Amino acid sequence: MKKNRSFILALLFSCILTACGNDASPLAEQTQPSSPNPQREEKSLEAAPSDGNNKAKTLVVYFSQPETNDANKMTKEEDNSTVVIDGKVLGNTQYVAYVIQENTGADIFRIEPEIPYPLDHTTLIDQAKEEQNRKFRPAIKARIENMDQYGTIFLGYPNWWSDMPMILYTFLEKYDLAGKTIIPFNTHGGSGFSNTVKTIAELAPEAKVNKNGLTISRNVVQEAEGDIIAWLKDLGY
């Protein structure tokens, strides 16, 4: 079980919003961006001023959906979708996003749907499958107003039904990512990336999609900090 890991991540980043990931059942987990320190007050990227240094900054964008906000008495499905730090429930992908942000100094943005996803496991996986079948594009609650200043985007998501959650399609179709480098990362219950890296390249054809992405099983995500840092070092961070 992935229960209370007590470590303090430094307060290094400037911005935040929302995300998801758990697919052994077909899903991997979901929720909203925030600081590496889960107790820190969150800020919106929309409030972050551009420094005029276009295409130089790095941004972590993620979607994560923990299936509970209560750290106590979790069901198996709820436990599979979460990491608990100092009593604060984080989604699996959310946790990975925080570690990346902490070790790169990047800004961070959580993809959050206008209409929140249900927390009930069965309802959530049924809705995720229905969205896939309909090729639905859920609306995103907030917007990145200054995307031009970012040259590299770490893009994180859970594997849902062997694909990205459909809200990732919304994100990739909403923004012009031409000329940017996209570095995928995800969490999963057994399916790894599936074909999602190829899908990202198809949805952002003028971006450079790094094939050396990071995929982490939900079963080990709470112990993966060292692997995440080693991966970042391999990327030059």
Image (cartoon, rainbow, N blue to C red):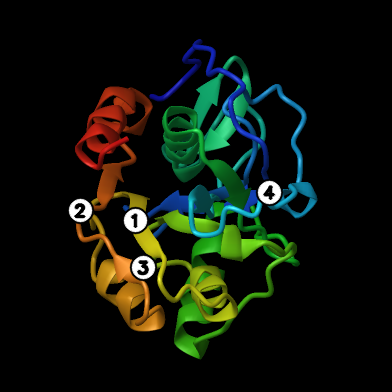
Q: Residue at x 26, y 52 (%)?
A: 213
Instruction: Classify mark 2: helix, strand or loop.
Output: loop
In space, the residues marked 1 and 4 are separated at their CA atoms by 19 Å
Point out the frontmost of discs 1 and 4: 1
- Decide if residue 120 is in sight here: yes
Q: Amino acid at mark 2?
A: Asn
Q: Which residue is mark 1?
A: 183
- Measuring from the top left, give residue 163's x and y in whole percent: 35, 69
In space, the residues marked 2 and 3 are separated at their CA atoms by 22 Å
Label 1–label 4 contact, CB within 8 A: no
In space, the residues marked 3 and 1 are separated at their CA atoms by 21 Å
Q: Which residue is mark 4?
A: 17
Q: Which residue is mark 2?
A: 212
- Measuring from the top left, give residue 154's x and y in whole percent: 42, 52
Q: Residue at x 37, y 27 (%)?
A: 222
Q: Which residue is mark 3?
A: 161
